[in-house]
Amino acid sequence: MTDPVRSAARYKARYKVGRAKTSNEPLDEVARRYEAAMAELAAMESKVKEVIHTFGVPGSQYVPYLDFGRQLYKLNRQERVSDENHAMAAKVLLDKWAARGCDPNILAKIRKDVFTSANRRPGSAALSPLTPPPEAVNRMPQAVSTHRCCART
């Protein structure tokens, strides 16, 4: 994603006026939000590229790291994700891309340098560490069966 302005212009060209009339939002507001989101995404990708470049990753291997960044970006924009769930989801993403051949140190650096608590969407929980707190694991409710075969005596 090199030019967010060009992307926004293509979006406006694709946007059908008939759809805008069915919603309560005017077309300009939708286009303004799209432009802002594209600018934010382009800024995030440039930061990810800076981190990748500092590690000396060849250009042919940028795509998986950028995809990791895009998925973390999407996770960061979710408003109703608690700190614990966010940490677990971010850890799963890190493990997924490490299993696909990306260097876990570079992935952790991308997560730390590019995605900080200041980058979280307003109203969402702050970015938490990679591992959930131990009390989160102990709060899981224990299953209790009332069936006669499964009931504990």
Image: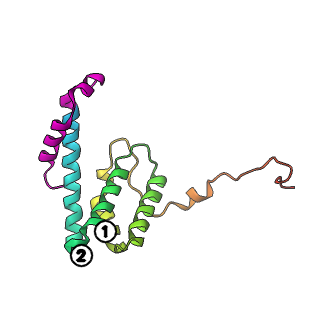
82 versus 128 height, above or below: above
Residue at x-position 23% and y-position 33%:
30
- Is 5 inside the magenta-drawn segment? yes
Residue interval drawn in magenta: 1-29
Out of 17 and 119, give the one closest to the viewer. Answer: 17
Residue at 38% x, 55% y is 127
Q: Quadrant of residue 136?
A: bottom right
Q: From the viewer's side, name the closer residue of 149 and 108.
A: 149
Q: Quadrant of the N terminus?
A: bottom left
Is residue 137 toward the left or the right of residue 28 in the image? right
Which SS class for mark 1? helix
**144 over 107 or under it: above or below:** above
The disc at residue 31 is none
Give whichever of 66, 151 is nearer the camera: 66
According to the image, label 2 marks what residue?
Answer: 55
Question: Looking at the rendering, which quadrant does residue 137 occupy?
Answer: bottom right
Residue 99 pos. (x, y %): 42, 72
Residues packed near mark 1 inside 10 Å, few (<14), some (14 to 19) or many (20 plus)? some
In this view, the residue in front, 147 or 120, is 147
Disc 2, disc 1: CB below 8 Å? yes
Assign the C terminus to one quadrant of the image. bottom right
Task: Give x and y (percent) for residue 61.
Answer: 26, 72
Q: Is residue 49 left or right of residue 105?
A: left
- Badge 2 crowding class, 10 Å Cα cut-off, few under 14, some 14 to 19, many 20 or more, is few
Main SS category, magenta section: helix
Residue located beneath label 1 in the image = 109
Relative height, residue 34 to residue 56 (above, below): above
